[in-house]
Image (cartoon, coloured by chain):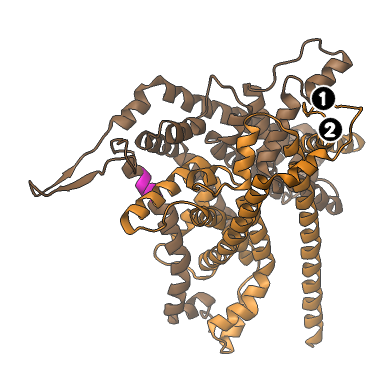
Amino acid sequence: MATSTFAAVSTALSAGRRLVTAVPYFWLAVFFAVPFAIVFKISFSYMVPAQPGYAPLFEWLEESRRLVATFNLANYQVLLQDSLYLNTFLYSLKVAAISTVLCLLLGYPMAYAIARSAPTTRNLFLMLIILPFWTSFLLRVYAWIGLLKTNGVINNTLLSLGIIDQPLVLLYTDFAVYVGIVYSYLPFMILPLYSNLEKHDLTLLEAAADLGARPFKAFFKITLPLSMPGIVAGCLLVFIPAVGEFVIPSLLGRTDQLMIGTVLSAQFFGARNWPVASAVAIGLLLVLLLPILLFQRYQQRELEASRR
Amino acid sequence: MNDRGLFRKSILGLGLAFLYVPILSMMFFSFNNSRLVTVWDAENSPTLRWYVRLFENEQLLGAAWISIKIAALSASGAAILGTLAGLVLTRFGPFRGRALLSAMTTAPLVMPEVIMGIAMLLLFVALEQMIGWPEGRGLLTITIAHVTFTMAYVTVVVQSRLAGFDDALEEAALDLGAKPATVFFKITLPLIMPAIVSGWLLAFTLSWDDVVISQFVSGPGSSTLPMEIFSRVRRGVSPDINALATIMVLIVATGVVASTIWMKRQERKRALEEQMARSDTP
């Protein structure tokens, strides 16, 4: 009976198994996969002022008894030719990349410090890292407005200490967006790094020390290369959503340079140009396709590794 | 060794200060009497006037009620669907279409919200045109959208829990002639219950917190609390939002601490029972 795993037995009872598989499959297919197909389709449509806002791609013409297809490539042309879109894409990638690096620079030492502290205090620190994540994301971003604005907490403190005599312009700058992203996504950086660093075999470092390596060198030769999977996972978890971030730049960011998420929703709600908004969404998806696939591979490998 | 301990403490102190100072400052200024929020009015503060005003604000209270309903419903839906997906992916072995299911359950974890939002809305518009359902947009469409993006989180939590213990118990029960459904309800479900509970809580929080996706798929009269807050804070800081934030932070902190303690206890109880069961067999 060596082969009688759960899977083998359930193959025999495949009706029940099929039902269990079908329910989540159906849900995700209808509400996750099909929507992307629709966005793709509409990105080739012409905009029409009436509901639903876009012209059909295929139309059956009764008089001539023909099926007519009308593809509009202009939506993508706009994307490539209008410097506004190209600029916004590049700016979003830049902001996300810088924020991701800052997040790593702050998150790595924190994850390292937690992983190397006493096992009893580890859980407490982890909970303190995760706790803000459970409180409203929106309100945590809002908290930074109060800190950064002209008569905000930071400026008032610096002024009263006499360090500055003119309030600094902190809010509605690139800096504010970096701070907002690092602040909101820090737990997503720390957690994968921690779960990687915690598993390291510390005897490797002892061996390096015995052989005369300084702690600094041992870190760069052993710890850092070993933690690469954690670094990649953490960076992807911050970078991918940050590129399409909407709330943080609209509350803290510049008004003269928008991020792609803001432009997308402005096209959608403001200009009501659904076809162009769809083309922007598809463009963003294409830009992020590689990182998303990379993340999926990592996620898969993590699960395989945790299987006993 | 000593200066390394110092490095550890200072980096953690700095990081935690970065995480908590904004929240604490927001809470502190909720007791400020001044309308300028961050300029402390020493004469008339601390005050509870913004809390009083908050509870008189029916628009915000109504939105909070809508948000609670949506979050509870979608978390429950996500817990059921996510558990099924996790079970299928870890226990059913290879089958055709497994890769697609796996991809569809991890993609929402990192998918930018604006893309999810626009995709869901266009689906609802197309569906309404084709089959007349869902009629308009509101609580139903927000709930469906939230189930879809939160179930991925439940799946991941359940999957890693299932991967953490082998299927020997399930196998043994099947060998002894138990039906698969019985095995699931008697063995698998109790074992993964902690994961389902934390998945539910996670889904609830994510739904309760979501503003971007909700904005796309909501209709008139179905503004959630984050949507209300967002439209207010876009106009700048306001003292009653600070009061609201303070209340929410306190509720969440209590909830998280309580549920963590509860889950730790359950774990310990289970470990103890396991130990006793082992020592019973000669």
Specify whether residue A246 is painted magenta: no
Question: Is tag 1's residue or tag 2's residue first in the polypeptide sequence?
Answer: 2
Residue at 76% in and 55% down:
B256
Subunit of label 1:
B
- Chain of residue at mark 2: B
Q: Amino acid at mark 1?
A: Val
Mark 1 and mark 2: span between their CA atoms?
8 Å
Q: What kind of element bears circle 1?
A: loop
Q: At which x and y percent is residue A252?
A: 64, 28
Q: Are marks 1 and 2 in contact (CB under 8 Å)?
A: yes
Q: To which quarter of the image does residue A253 belong?
A: top right
Q: Residue at x 50, y 75 (%)?
A: A7
Please provide percent x and percent y for residue A141.
68, 35
Pick the residue in front: A98 or A109: A98
Q: Which residue is mark 1?
A: B39
Near mark 1 (Cα within 10 A), the count class, few <14, some 14-19 or many ≥20, is some
Q: Colour of chain A?
A: brown
The residue that appears at 77% across and 73% down in the rendered structure is B270
**Element under disc 2:** loop
In the image, which residues are magenta?
Answer: A35-39
Viewer-closest of A124 and B51: B51
Quarter of the C terminus of chain B within the rendering = bottom right
The dominant secondary structure in magenta is helix
Residue B252 sits above or below residue B29 on the image: below
User: Which mark identifies residue A75?
Assistant: none
Pointer 2: what residue?
Answer: B32
* Quadrant of the rendered image containing residue B40: top right
Give me the chain that's orange: B
